[in-house]
Amino acid sequence: MHADKWALKAKQSGYKTRAVYKLEEILTKTRSLNTSHKILDIGSAPGGWSHYLKLKLPNSKIYA
């Protein structure tokens, strides 16, 4: 993980990667985050986005 402010913030928040903040921005702008989902994460390595979505939507099914 890079040692910039976003990487440090992600580490403190318990996220695997700093990329979750970009995903959060995308989901906010597109209003795509609802309460129940079936999610397909294509190219899921290293798994940071799947981890973020599972924390935000614990009842969702994530296929990676």
Image (spheres, helix red, strand yellow):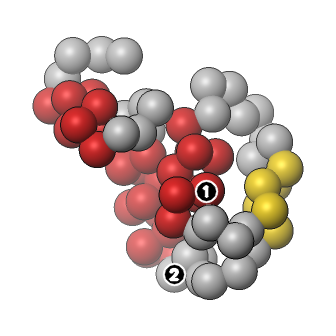
Q: Residues within 10 Å of mark 2 (few under 14, many from 20)?
A: few
Q: What residue is rendered at 84% in x and 50% in y?
A: 63
Residue 42 found in image quarter: top right
User: Where 18 sits versus 3, above or below?
Assistant: below
User: Where 34 sits versus 46, above or below?
Assistant: below
Q: What residue is rendered at 15% in x and 31% in y?
A: 5
Q: At which x and y percent is residue 30?
A: 52, 76
Cα separation, mark 1 vs mark 2, equals: 17 Å
Residue type marked 2: Arg
Left or right of 40 on screen, residue 56: left
Question: Which quadrant is home to the C terminus?
Answer: top right
Q: What element carries label 1?
A: helix
User: Where 3 sits versus 15, above or below?
Assistant: above
Q: What residue is rendered at 60% in x and 83% in y?
A: 34
Residue closer to the observer: 25 or 9: 9
Q: At which x and y percent is residue 55?
A: 52, 58
Is mark 1 in CB contact (under 8 Å) with mark 2? Answer: no
- The circle drawn on residue 31 is 2
Can you name the residue that lies furthest to the top here?
2
Residue type marked 1: Lys
Asked whether residue 49 is in view, the answer is: yes
Residue highlighted by disc 1: 54
Q: What residue is rendered at 36% in x and 39% in y?
A: 14
User: Which-is-in-front pick, marks 1 and 2?
Assistant: 1
